[in-house]
Amino acid sequence: MELIKHECGIAMIRLLRPLSYYKEKYGSSFYGLNKLYLIMEKEHNRGQEGAGVGCVKLDAEPGQEYIFRERAQGSDAIRDLFASIGNQIKEARTEGADNSDNIPLPFEGEVYMGHLRYSTTGRSGIGYVHPFMRRNNWSSRNLLLCGNFNMTNVDEIFDSIVATGQHPRLYADTFLLLEQLGHALDRENERLFSIHQEAGLRGLDLSRAIARDLNVGNLLHRCAPTWDGGYVICGIVGNGDMWAMRDPNGIRPAFYYRNDEVIVVASERPVIQTAFDLQADDVHELMPGEAIIVDRDGSSKIERVLPEGRNERCSFERIYFSRGSDKDIYNERKQLGKNLVPQVLKAVNNDIDRTVLSFIPNTAEVAFFGLVEGFEEHLIVDKIEEINRLASIGALTDRNIHDVLRHRIRKEKVAIKDIKLRTFIAEGDTRKDLAAHVYDITYGSIREGDYLVAIDDSIVRGTTLRESILRILDRLHPGKLVIVSSSPQVRYPDCYGIDMSRMDEFIAFKAAMALLRERGMSYVIDTVYRKCKEQENLPKEEVRNYVKDIYAPFSDEEISAKIAEMLRPEEVTTPIEIVYQTVEAMHQAIPGHPGDWYFTGDYPTPGGTRIVNKAFINYYEGRRDAR
């Protein structure tokens, strides 16, 4: 399995009872913080470059802190983050003795947000770790912001902000959204200020009335129509209002649960189930274009902010990124494996007796189960046909029946992900040699000359195959290696929050380009570049994806064969075939998530189409820019 950086993960918790309630019932006033920690750990797969926590305490007295934020970087960010928070709480308790003055402790609040970060634009550093914070002396003008998103029209958002007279400090989409939403929050405060001042309110009475009547839905209705991208955007206002909003095409996922004690939002359903011991039906999907909004008084509603667009829920989310413990995702991944049976049978010449099925650990295991089930169902049909044949010629003896029934699907755990070898002291060929041994094999698991079929969840770059897996599987001396991808060929970059942004990262693109050059069709490359350049100054709504023309001359099988040729290590002589899932079979396995732009180039938003053309221009011109 080759690693792809996932999209980010979000988590939000709103406690609906006084903190004393949770202390009495659950033994801690930090019930919400503890649940946030559990959810973030369960979403750890979604972000391993940084993590952050934000907290708002309701009804704090003037002079008392009511907004808290902590962030950390690195693969141990969650551990470091909560260790730091724990130390702050411990120090505050020590300074306050037994807290007899009822001084609020850090991160002891009713509203929480958590964020797990994967950088998808190359920017790193603690300053890019969510949540972002906007400070103000008025509680209702403070803002904490985090999200799982990439905006494809950053330039348009930037221009809209500048047009209001603001001076953004940075050009990154998160900074710009903070400024945009912050400006809308200021306008909402000013609207309420005028209303309540005219009604005669002054001082704290005025600020409390604003905090009470603030409508964060107005912020979203003002800003969201300018957004183009895949997103779940979450915010907490200093007065305690909270929201999470999903993009109108449903590209990025969000789920929520609410009862009389808590409201929780997260990127994945099973993490909420685990954290709160729930059934799948207890957790609801936040629908595209909707926001879940929780008022400071604890009342909540689902509000439609944007019209629901075409369903573009991400298919790769189901194949690769999400936790396989979700009941629907588990069954979908099994079906992906089962759908590959006809192609795999063709690759092994329908010789089941000489075929050994295996998988490349660890995320392809569920698809492997489906592949095995599909082979077993096929074998049952073969057995019935053979028994009927024997009966028709009068040869249905116990011995013959036994010989038919003894046939089994051969399956082995051939590849083992052994250890994460440290290569920091190695250089050159030594480093490559160590990397090649990240996987080990089970010696004696196949007979020499067998067809060895190994399924992976995706083959995007092919680096791990070339540098490690093909080499170690070749040591078993199979008659043929069949490497199977449960996803189709990844041909186009993502621009909605996943780290697949450059054309030259994709082995399918490299294969198509190599075929064009080998067959004297380099003019196609030049023509695509020219057409892309001609569109640079067009409105994004008018841009077409001409990069599709790179693949148009070739069948999927031709590109797969070229990929196998390009990934073969020099010393490996075993015949190698690479089999990819078809787009049609993927849609059959995952009918509720038809977003397939990685594979087809059919982007759900105009900004995505513009970015794929830009990515090709950058490739052609030799630039490493993602956009």
Image (spheres, rainbow, N blue to C red):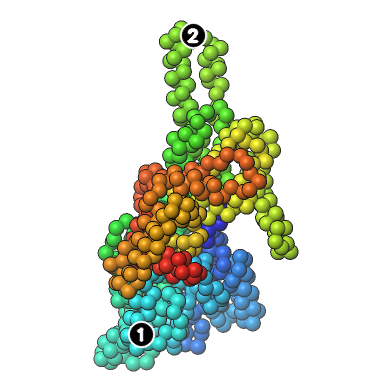
- Separation (CA) of disc 2 from disc 1: 86 Å
Query: How far across and down, in percent of the image, does residue 503 sit?
Result: 46, 61
Q: Residue extending furthest front?
A: 520
Identify the amino acid type marked 2. Ala
Residue 293 seen in render: no
Residue 162's disc is: 1
Secondary element type, mark 1: helix
Is 290 left, or right, of 576 in this rendering? left
Which residue corresponds to mark 2? 395
Identify the amino acid type marked 1. Val
Residue at image coords 55%, 16%? 402
Query: How far across and down, in percent of the image, does residue 446 sit?
Result: 64, 33
Secondary element type, mark 2: loop
Residue at image coords 52%, 9%? 397
**Residue nearer the viewer, 570 or 248:** 570
Query: How far across and down, in percent of the image, does residue 598 sit?
Result: 42, 56
